[in-house]
Amino acid sequence: MFDRWGRWVHRRRRWVLAVAGAALVFAAVWGTGVFGALTSSGGFDTPGSQSAEAARIAERDLGRDQADVVVLYQGRTTVDDPSFRTSVEGALAALPSDKVAKASTFWTTNAPQFVSRDRKATYAVLQLAGSDEAAREDAYKAIRDDLTEVGGGLTAKVGGAVGTGVAINERVSSDIGRAEGMAMPVLLVLLVLIFGGLVSASLPLLVGGLAILGSFTALHALTYVTDVSIFAVNITTFLGLGLAIDYGLFMVSRFREEIGRDGATAEDALAATMATAGRTVAVSGVTVAVSLSGLLLFDQNFLVSMGYGGIATVLVCMAGALTVLPALMAVLGPKVNALPIRRRRAAAGRTDGWWGRVARSVMRRPVVYMVATMALLLALGAPFLRINWGGVDAKVLPDGADARVVAETLEARFPRNATSPIEAVVTGTSDRAAVQAYGARLDALPGVTDAAVTGAKGTTTRIALRYDADPNSGAARDLVQRVRDVPPPPGARAHVGGQTADVVDQLSSIGATLPWLAVLVGGATFLLLFLAFGSVLLPLKAIVMNMLSLSATFGAVVLVFQDGHLSGPLDFTATGAISPAMPILMLAMLFGISMDYEVFLLSRVREQYDLTGSNTAAVASGVQRTGAIITSAALLFIVVIGAFATSGITFIKMTGVGMAVAILLDATVVRALLVPATMRLLGRANWWAPGPLARLYGRYGIREGDAPAPSRLEPVG
């Protein structure tokens, strides 16, 4: 199938490139409009959860009470000085009424949480005009400069939900251009060194550029049918660029190998390339897309939009690698080796190169290597057992950003959790005495410092609870559960929400969905790898090794981003907590990407096994033939991720660093040591399948030519 596709592309190569050129122009014009169509930085809440219901009911019955903008005022005098009040109220009065719906201050509410402990700072909470998030963001941008203009010797800094969201959006957009500018020159230099020629080096980079514009176009199209988070731009861009360069490296390397064979024509070389590397790219791309499809099972819009964007991006990469790249290679033919910068070295033999010697060394002592590598991966993963969960807030911004300064100042100098209380929304009763009694029971809970009614209308009352614990701590999550356990007034219902309650609901929702993710991704991956290699044991082994690699990655993420190790060199401030959505996103992406290298390696091993019938020789040859390419692909991917890991948004940096660690482990410890060791121990059982499945593979397997179906179980050796 794939060889026929290669010949078809070769015959129609100019038409393929013409269509690709038109698509590229469209993507450059329309696709780049994605930046104005994405939603803001939210999407981490859990629709239908108790915290989401609390927010929905309170807004419906009591009106919006969100801190869209928080303006922090600081001065040398105290808030008791009349000039302090005059300056703040004068600045707020000057704001246009069509942009600000309501402004709350210490002097309008007399609420003590509005004043710092030293009484030299206070804040105003603004509710912006606008029926939706986009309208409120526009209102904020219109008054942003005016918010910091205050007299009387005071200084003003701006934060709050909308202020933070806009700051994140603008940072994400600027990070994209900077990361691409950093990555592209480095990638070109490395590709030239890897290939030894300018023409061959430019092909994977060209596919990478197409992938970036293609991912923008795919995301823009998705915004017409669903909300897509602004964070999807960063993550799908580096995912698309990394995968496209991986696929380009695999394809170009194999084409150069085939075109160098005696008597090989460009068409024959392309057909052979598509039958081998092209088949691998197709299996890998579908595997990565299936892994990302698991994100669609979750309730959080952030994960769902990442799933849609990731799937679209992977399909764009795969399509480019299987159409545009073969057409370019067909046009170039032997000229793919043009403009060399050094003489090409002769290809290494099947097992006599450095990687082959490593594989043979491992296979002489497979038990030692397997136990040692598994112990290393488990030890690296151990810190994940003490992960602390938290929400996404202004602390994801760089140190010194105004929105972050506001959040940190409120936490350090004002009563604890003044702007992030636990909220109990009581519905179904207008009995004020019963509601007051319920509030008193909440106030008496250990850890609660104050319970105050912040809104009441008809049969709905909102009670805000301030407490001593950090909102991202386990103690705060336990307090949420204790609040939920308090019986509401007779005949009434209570919905408990707020920042910490939202994290509790996220954890509950994600925990309930994880088994379904395992069934979908694990089952689909097993099926795809079985159809690719005709083995029952290899897919199971690949899944287990991927989970070991992922556990080590998550342990490293905890050490770095929760505990703060390397925070100086990586330029971020550890918050002591990790959002529950981020490990899920990393799991979905990395599970698929790890299979990328697995499929490439096993394809070469299977190819040699079909020729020789020797498991040991096939493994050594497969590792030798793919070792340099997988290492190069991993290095290039790490360069891409490293550029995007310079993002000023902490959890995008965390995703990048985590992926870099995973790819490094996968391309070295797992592929060079653990895979040869386990395949040596399994021997011929690597390729075994029971009779019915062997016949299924013989009929429907994704293989080329007359490759044989797997043999029945033979002695391991």
Image (tube, rainbow, N blue to C red):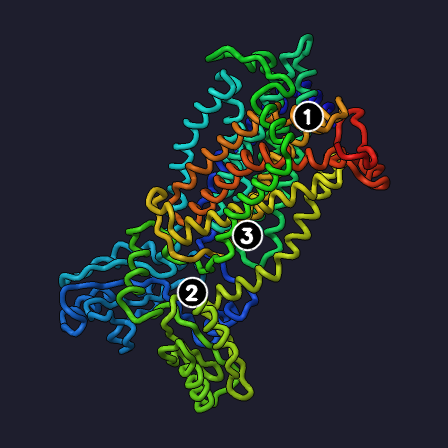
Q: Callout 2: 10 Å neighbours few (<14), some, many (20+)?
A: some
Query: Which residue is the site of mark 2?
Result: 473
Q: Is residue 714 left or right of residue 203?
A: right
How far, Cα to Cα, is label 1 from label 3? 32 Å
Q: How far from the left and from the top, in percent, is residue 281?
A: 64, 32
Q: Compared with residue 221, is residue 331 higher up or lower down, i.e. above or below?
A: above
Q: Residue at x 17, y 64 (%)?
A: 75
Q: Residue at x 50, y 53 (%)?
A: 384
Q: Amino acid at mark 1?
A: Thr
Q: Are marks 2 and 3 in contact (CB under 8 Å)?
A: no
Q: Amino acid at mark 3?
A: Ile
Q: Amino acid at mark 2?
A: Ser
Which numbered disc covers residue 711?
none
Q: Give the camera-side residue of 543 and 196.
A: 543
Query: Which residue is the site of mark 1?
Result: 276
Q: Is residue 683 left or right of residue 281?
A: right
How far, Cα to Cα, is label 2 from label 3? 20 Å
